[in-house]
């Protein structure tokens, strides 16, 4: 997610109040979207770590689905 899109998210809309990585309170500059929901983190580093992990999982799932369909990419 780009910085512009991060800036549009509101802490009031977050589904959580504590960072899933650290347990610390979430910060307004550390929000992202996940499955259509705003998720908060204690700092941008935790948010970015989450986004990176999600991308890796999504890429792995897409590759698995392509292989299962016989469309190795």
Image (cartoon, rainbow, N blue to C red):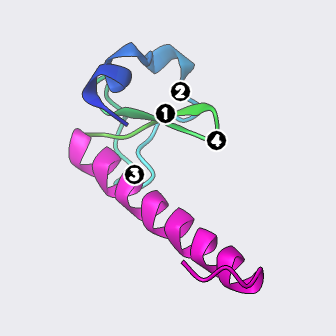
Q: How many tags in the picture?
A: 4
Magenta residue check for 14:
no
Q: Report the side of 55 relative to 72 (left or right).
A: left
Q: Which mark is residue 36?
A: none
- Is disc 1 in contact with disc 4, using a CB cutoff of under 8 Å? no
Q: Which numbered disc, 3 or 2, marks the residue closer to the eye?
A: 3
The residue carrying pointer 4 sits among few (fewer than 14), some (14 to 19) or many (20 or more) residues within 10 Å by Cα, namely few
For the C terminus, the quadrant is bottom right
Q: Which numbered disc, 4 or 2, marks the residue closer to the eye?
A: 4
Which residues make up the magenta segment?
44-73
Magenta residue check for 59:
yes
Q: Give the x, y percent position of residue 49.
A: 31, 57
Whether 27 is drawn above or below 22: the answer is above
Residue with the mark numbered 2: 14
- The residue depicted at 55 percent of the width and 63 percent of the height is 58
- Of label 1 and label 4, which has the lower sequence position? 1
Q: Give the x, y percent position of residue 31.
A: 39, 31
- Of label 3 and label 2, which has the lower sequence position? 2
Residue with the mark numbered 3: 51
Residue with the mark numbered 1: 17
Inter-mark Cα distance, 2 to 1? 7 Å
Q: Give the x, y percent position of residue 63.
A: 58, 76
- The residue depicted at 55 percent of the width and 19 percent of the height is 13
């Amino acid at each position: 997610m780009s910085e512009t899109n991060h800036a549009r998210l509101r802490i009031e809309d977050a589904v959580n109040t504590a960072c899933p990585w650290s347990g610390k309170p979430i910060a307004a500059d550390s929000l992202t979207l996940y499955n259509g929901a705003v998720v908060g983190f204690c700092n941008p580093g935790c948010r970015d770590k989450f986004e990176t992990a999600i991308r890796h999982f999504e890429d792995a799932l897409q590759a698995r689905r392509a292989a299962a369909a016989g469309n190795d990419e």
